[in-house]
Amino acid sequence: MHSYLSSAGITGVKVDVIQLLEVICEEYGGRVELANAYYKGLTESLIRNFNGTGMISSMQQCNDFFFLGTWQTSFGRTGDDFWFHDPNGDPMGAYWLQGLHMIHCAYNSLWMGQMILPDWDMFQSDHCCAKFHAGSRAICGGPIYVSDSVGHHDFHLIKQLVFPDGTIPKCIHFALPTRDCMFKNPLFDGETILKIWNLNKFGGVLGAFNCQGAGWDIKEHRFKGYSHLYKPVSGEVHVKDMEWGQKQETSAMGEAEEYAVYLNQSDELVLMSPESDAICITVQPSSFEIFSFVPIRRINGNDNVVKFAPIGLTNMFNGGGAICGVEWVGGGVRVTVKGGGRLLAYSSGKPRVVTVTELLRK
């Protein structure tokens, strides 16, 4: 099958229900023997047909996979499936299941992210919570893909995630919960916002998501919706929520004296220092805000010192990921940007001149 797909021009595959090996192994030598045989065959096929790593693993949250199946597999699902609606019939499931999905992916990435690049699964761009999903995928650090029916695409939403050439402004780490919500319950306690952070090449990004609305029913042994939790939730966001030291190339950004902070959904720009008060926010149910934190640097001009920060494309959820290069040249700065749209930058003084020097195309 893989050789046939490869010959037809397919460059990668998604293999689902991998954990099933655990429950069919009894008559085939046991878990270890069966898993070894399957993962050996899968690895060899990937090397022959898909450049070694052209596979996304799905439903592989089992020990056998992480010990035996990661020789050639770089992507792996960290949560449950994307559910368009609740298979158990709860009409509110179309909403609370989406927050549950994000929470599973974010917290499971604490462990799984040490071995694979976390995959947050596909979603559908015409779903009632499509924007909610899109905001999380934009900063998750993994692949972004949709499973829309033909003709049911929200291109306005998709263009906020994807460059015209099909690539994405991908973060350079994988998204993780902030420390202050690590041992909280952002699904069921009625007060906690799920905050997840990630890193771009020239700044940080943090998403604040209201996932409240469901919980585990100890009698029915399943998650179910609780309407009294489906309400606005308030919280705080600060630059100290960022974990700059998780990547060597971003650690210096954590030492800045001041940051430009852009709120993507409300289209606001504020300044913040490590000593500043936190930004207070209220997030509606199944809604979110994305914060871009960009260190402010000084440009030494002929007459004065100007403070500057390149923030990114405001028409994309992870606009900071569109900044590909920043060069501090004399009394000015050269910023390389991928994609198109409205470029936002902070400057403490009025620029003498702003020029677009070249348009690069493949």
Image (cartoon, helix red, strand yellow):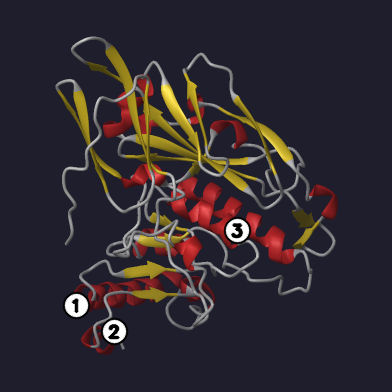
Instruction: Please state the horizontal and vertical placement of residue 145, each as a whole percent of the image.
Output: 43, 67
Relative side of 243 to 169, left or right: right
Q: CA distance from mark 2 to mark 3?
A: 30 Å
Q: In which quadrant will I find the C terminus?
A: bottom left
Q: Amino acid at mark 3?
A: His
Q: Which residue is disc 1 drawn over? A: 48
Helix, strand or loop at disc 3? helix
Q: In this orientation, which residue lies closer to the viewer: 138 or 37?
A: 138
Q: Position of residue 295 (x, y in %)?
A: 36, 26
Q: Nearer the N terminus, badge 1 or badge 2? A: 2
Q: Is residue 61 visible?
A: no
Q: Is residue 187 above or below residue 49?
A: above
- Amino acid of disc 2: His
Amino acid carrying label 1: it is Arg
Image check: 6 left or right of 263? left
Can you tell which quarter of the image residue 8 is in?
Answer: bottom left
Q: Which residue is mark 3?
A: 101
Q: CA distance from mark 1 to mark 2?
A: 9 Å
Please name the residue that numbered disc 2 is placed on. 2
Give the alpha-carbon distance from disc 3 to disc 1, as whole Å: 34 Å
- Discs 1, 2 touching: Cβ within 8 Å: yes
